Image (cartoon, rainbow, N blue to C red):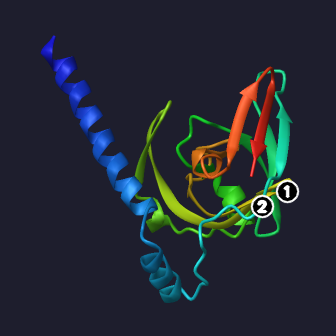
Amino acid sequence: MTRPIVWALGVTAAAAIWGIGLAERFQRPAAENATIATQLGERAVTPVVRSGQSTLTLFADAQGHYSTDAVIDGKRLHMLIDTGATACAFTYEDAERAGLRVGERDFRVPIQTANGTILAALVRIPEIRIGTITVQGVNGMVMPRGRLSTSLLGMSFLKRLNEFNMSSGRLTLRG
């Protein structure tokens, strides 16, 4: 009886520690981000929502899911809106197409999925645009080849909007 409880507490503690570490990684100070960007030869990206009061309304499909096309680095990707996903998650193939290059050694962040734990690669997307809404400096992750069927537009994008509301088969996003 105590063995399952101890196991559950261990898993919970590991998830909490991982979550804190991930949050710290995603919330680097702007100066540190600029330093890292300079070291990588990139322009520092200020994480702000650029569009003023842009509104986009999406309608649920027959299964009740919301999806949209997102533009990243000029490439259009079909993405499923997932309020249960902490961050945007990309299939390996979509990430390559959008210029989010990762190597085998980048897959080192453990992610718990319905099918078990996998290792993902963290990325920072300079800009994601859906309709007239643009968000810059979005944190995300790339999944190993074959481990995700559709890229997910998660909370690292959605929480940066002014508002999002789901009601009567409609998802309204306001930038």
Q: Is residue 69 above or below residue 52?
A: above
The residue sitting at 48% across, 88% down in the picture is 39
The residue sitting at 67% across, 61% down in the picture is 95
Q: Amino acid at mark 1?
A: Thr
Measured in 3D between alpha carbons, the distance from the residue under mark 1 to the one under mark 2, in whole angstroms, is 7 Å
Q: Is residue 1 left or right of residue 73?
A: left
Q: Is residue 102 above or below residue 15?
A: below
Q: Contact, CB < 8 Å: mark 1 with mark 2?
A: yes
Q: Nearer the viewer, mark 1 or mark 2?
A: 2
Label 1 Cα crowd, 10 Å radius (few <14 / some 14-19 / many 20+): some
Q: Position of residue 86 (x, y in %)?
A: 52, 44
Nearer-the-camera pick, 128 or 103: 128
Q: Position of residue 164 (x, y in %)?
A: 70, 39
Q: Residue furthest left?
A: 2
Residue 75: quadrant of the picture:
bottom right
Q: Position of residue 84 (x, y in %)?
A: 57, 34
Please tell me the numbered disc located at residue 2.
none
Pointer 1: what residue? 132
Question: Helix, strand or loop at disc 1?
Answer: loop
Nearer-the-camera pick, 98 or 19: 19
Q: Position of residue 110 (x, y in %)?
A: 40, 48
The residue sitting at 76% across, 46% down in the picture is 174
Q: Amino acid at mark 2?
A: Ser
Pointer 2: what residue? 51
Nearer-the-camera pick, 117 or 14: 14
Q: Does label 1 or label 2 sit earlier along the sequence? A: 2
Q: Is residue 80 left or right of residue 160?
A: right
Which quadrant of the rendered structure holds the N terminus? top left
Q: Is residue 44 above or below residue 115?
A: below
